[in-house]
Amino acid sequence: MLQSTKVVVGVDSGGCKTVAVVGDTEGKVLGRGTGGAANPLSVGIDRSVENIVTAIKNGTAKLKNPEIVSLYIGAAGGWPKVLKDLKKAVKLSPLLHIVGKLTVEDDLPIALYSGLPNGDGIVLIVGTGSAVYGVDKNGNKVHVSGWNHLLGETGGYELGLKALI
């Protein structure tokens, strides 16, 4: 029987690129991989899954038979229906060996917790799109914008241009 490597994977799937960080169950980073854009509102569910899988495969390339015991995806374009469809598609992918928990949320919580591990504060994302997300000490959450360019959000590109002019 082929020995497997149990891994946990965190994915930031954005409007321009996707990054996967792979670790062991003790928290040691084992690999990092990238893929293309994976905002399902911009590139569709199929392309999003393809680029998420690519990032994970690139991050696990040096491991023998990686077995994903926990997979967390923070996805740009995080509308509830889209996230549900993305989760289903990732779960059904024959290219990943997911044996544990799969969580798919919008990318705002991962941005907040990466800078504020206690989780109370505010984060502003100004990338391909833009959004503000905050959590207070009581766990109350607020989410502003994050609608994407299809609904008139201009994002980081236009803000950058305005800053230069």
Image (cartoon, rainbow, N blue to C red):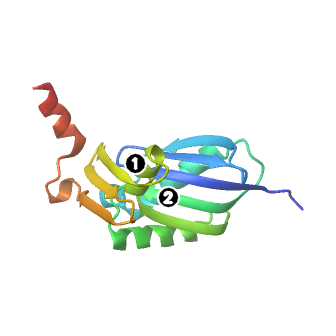
SS under mark 1: loop
Nearer the observer: mark 2 or 1; the answer is 2
In the rendered structure, are the residues bearing label 2 and label 1 in contact, judged by CB atoms less than 8 Å apart? no
- Tell me what residue is drawn at x 72 percent, y 41 percent: 62
Give the residue type at disc 1. Answer: Ala
- Tell me what residue is drawn at x 49 percent, y 49 percent: 117
Question: Height in image: 94 above or below 154?
Answer: below
Question: In this rendering, does residue 152 appear at all?
Answer: yes
In depth, the one of 98 and 8 nearer the eye is 8
Question: In this rendering, does residue 75 appear at all?
Answer: no
Q: CA distance from mark 2 to mark 1?
A: 13 Å
SS under mark 2: strand
Q: Quadrant of the N terminus?
A: bottom right
Residue 101 is left or right of residue 161, and the answer is right
Question: Height in image: 146 above or below 94?
Answer: above
In depth, the one of 120 and 149 nearer the eye is 120
Crowd rating for badge 1 (residues with CA inside 10 Å; few <14, some 14–19, many 20+):
many
Name the residue carrying label 2. Answer: 73
Residue 164 drawn at (x, y percent): 15, 25
Name the residue carrying label 1. Answer: 37
Of the residues under marks 2 and 1, which one precedes in the sequence?
1
Residue 115 drawn at (x, y percent): 44, 43
- Tell me what residue is drawn at x 85 percent, y 56 percent: 3
Residue 119 drawn at (x, y percent): 44, 55
